[in-house]
Structures are given as structure tokens and as C-alpha cells.
Image (cartoon, rainbow, N blue to C red):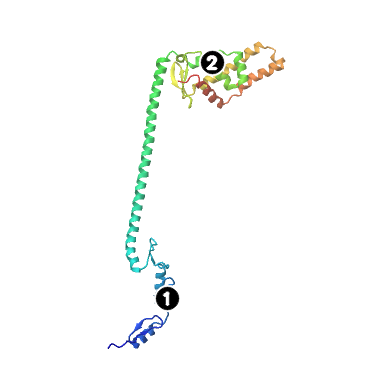
């Protein structure tokens, strides 16, 4: 017959012993209450053990610190942790690889963009040189008998009507009208000036019996010459009205003719060129 064995349990930690002497030895070491988890009631002898446990236990079991997935058993969390860490490292590697590939792709795209700009500039240069070549052929062959621009300006007839037009419409329109209407009387191949680019105001001028790209602004000098011719023709008006200074209306007209011709500025030159470009565009 098997006798019932009395077990002696620790009142602090509930640990059981067969012999009382062993319990007494244990009780000498078990001097503090167990540190228990407030979520799962698991006991720990040391506070540090409980602290580590609380980082993973939130009442829903054991939680993975990487993905926050919860498990009922610690062993399950341990197995998951090895897999999750591997997955996490793999994701990190993949992200780094993707970033490196993305940077390489952006670098290639930038290189392609730069190459396209270079090609576009080269094409523009080729097309521009081709256009310049066609213009030079047209000028040298078709317009070889055109008059010099300086001779044309000196032979433009200036009338009192032109002076009145300048007075009423301003210097820019006055000179532009005077040049434009006489250029229109000539055939395109006889004109001493042509505009190849209205936007940038690029002109070709017949200067000293040769066609030249007007980079030295000979056209500016021609406009100044025509302006001086208009001023000098005020004498024709004075001859027509010899007693103008005794007449208030004629005095005002005289001053109105003279003022715009003497009050021109550098900006007016560009405006006149823009007007003329419409008459001689090629």
C-alpha cells in the first residue's frame, strides 16, 4: 500500500518539496515576493526578468518586436523571430538594391537627357548653317544687282507730307513708313535689305557692293542718315511758309515736326527695325 506523501510548499512562490528540511533551506533564499506580469500573471524572481518580459507581453501573448505579431507561447515567438529577422534583413537588402537601381536609372535618364540636348543643338546648328547657306546663295545669285543700302537711303524722296506724317504719328512710325513704302516699290531681288529672322531682328544688307550679315549695325547708320535728311527737309517747309514764325498755328506745326526728329532714343531704333522686318522678310 502506497502511503500519501506530504508535500511542503513555499508560501511565497508555491514551490513544493518532499522533505521539510529542503523547504526550510529554500525559504532562507526566497525572501521576496515574486515579480508578476500584470498581463499574464507569470512570476519572476528578479525585476529585470519581469522588465524584459513586459517588453513582449501586452496581454495578447508574446509580441514580435520587429513586426508586432503576437504569439501565445514563448517558443512560438522564438521560432517566428528567427524567420522574421531573416525576412527583415531580406527586405532591407531588397530596399537597398531597389534604391541603387533607381539611382542608376536616374543617372541614365539624365545622361540621355543631356545627349538629347546635344543632338538637338547639333541639329539646330546644321539646320541653321543650311539656312544661312541658302540665304547666301539667294542674295549672291538672285539679288546681285540690288542697290547699296546707303545709296537707297540717300535717294529716298522726302516730302512735306512725310514730315507731317512723322509729326502726327511719331518718330518710329514716321521713319518706318518712309522706308517701308519706298522698299515696297522695289522688287524683292532689287531691295538693299532683307530680314532672315523677324524675332531676333537678323538683317542682311547690301553694303559697299557686297551682301553682309548686319552684325556691325550698318542699318542703324542708315536710319540715322534718313533722320538727318528729314531734319534738313524742314527747310522746304520753311520755304513754303516763310512767315511761319508770325503765325501761331504754323509755329506750333513747325515745333511739332522738329520735336520727334530731335527726341529719338536708342529704343526707337529697335522698334523701327521691327517695322521694317515686315517689309523685307525672307
Q: Residue at x 61, y 16 (%)?
A: 163
User: Is 155 in front, or is 80?
Assistant: 80
Q: Are marks 1 and 2 in contact (CB under 8 Å)?
A: no
Would you identify the image quadrant in which residue 116 lies? Answer: top left
Taking depth in this image into account, of 83 and 144 the one nearest to the observer is: 83
- Mark 2 or mark 1, which is nearer the start of the sequence? 1
Which residue is found at the position 35% from the left and 42% from the top?
108
Compare residues 252 and 221 and report the one nearer the observer: 252
Query: Quadrant of residue 40 in the image?
Result: bottom left
Q: Which mark is residue 35?
A: 1
Image quadrant containing the N terminus = bottom left
Cα–Cα span, label 1 and label 2: 109 Å
Horizontal and vertical percent position of residue 22: 34, 86
* Residue 198 at x, y percent in the picture: 48, 24
In the image, residue 40 above or below residue 238: below
Element carrying mark 2: helix
Q: Residue at x 65, y 20 (%)?
A: 256
Residue linked to disc 2: 181
Q: Is residue 228 left or right of residue 44?
A: right
Measured from the top left, where is residue 182 in percent x and y? 53, 14
Which quadrant is home to the C terminus? top left
Quick one: which residue is furthest to the front in this view? 1
Amino acid at each position: 500500500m502506497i502511503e500519501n506523501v506530504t508535500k511542503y510548499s513555499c508560501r511565497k512562490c508555491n514551490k513544493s518539496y518532499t522533505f521539510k528540511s529542503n523547504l526550510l533551506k529554500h525559504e532562507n533564499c526566497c525572501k521576496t515576493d515574486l515579480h508578476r506580469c500584470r498581463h499574464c500573471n507569470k512570476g519572476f524572481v528578479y525585476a529585470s526578468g519581469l522588465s524584459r518580459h513586459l517588453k513582449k507581453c501586452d496581454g495578447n501573448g508574446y509580441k514580435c518586436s520587429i513586426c508586432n505579431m503576437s504569439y501565445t507561447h514563448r517558443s512560438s515567438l522564438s521560432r517566428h523571430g528567427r524567420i522574421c529577422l531573416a525576412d527583415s534583413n531580406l527586405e532591407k537588402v531588397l530596399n537597398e538594391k531597389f534604391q541603387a537601381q533607381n539611382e542608376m536609372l536616374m543617372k541614365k535618364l539624365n545622361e540621355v537627357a543631356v545627349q538629347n540636348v546635344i543632338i538637338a543643338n547639333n541639329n539646330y546648328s546644321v539646320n541653321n548653317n543650311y539656312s544661312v547657306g541658302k540665304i547666301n546663295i539667294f542674295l549672291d545669285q538672285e539679288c546681285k544687282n540690288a542697290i547699296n543700302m546707303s545709296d537707297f537711303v540717300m535717294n529716298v524722296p522726302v516730302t512735306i507730307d512725310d514730315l507731317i506724317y512723322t509729326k502726327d504719328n511719331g518718330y518710329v512710325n514716321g521713319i518706318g513708313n518712309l522706308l517701308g513704302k519706298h522698299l515696297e516699290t522695289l522688287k524683292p531681288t532689287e531691295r538693299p535689305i532683307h530680314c532672315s529672322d523677324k524675332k531676333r531682328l537678323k538683317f542682311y544688307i547690301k553694303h559697299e557692293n557686297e551682301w553682309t550679315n548686319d552684325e556691325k549695325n550698318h542699318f542703324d547708320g542708315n536710319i540715322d542718315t534718313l533722320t538727318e535728311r528729314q531734319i534738313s527737309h524742314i527747310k522746304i517747309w520753311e520755304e513754303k511758309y516763310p512767315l511761319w514764325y508770325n503765325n501761331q498755328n504754323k509755329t506750333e506745326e513747325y515745333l511739332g515736326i522738329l520735336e520727334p526728329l530731335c527726341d529719338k532714343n536708342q529704343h526707337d531704333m529697335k522698334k523701327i527695325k521691327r517695322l521694317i522686318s515686315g517689309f523685307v522678310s525672307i
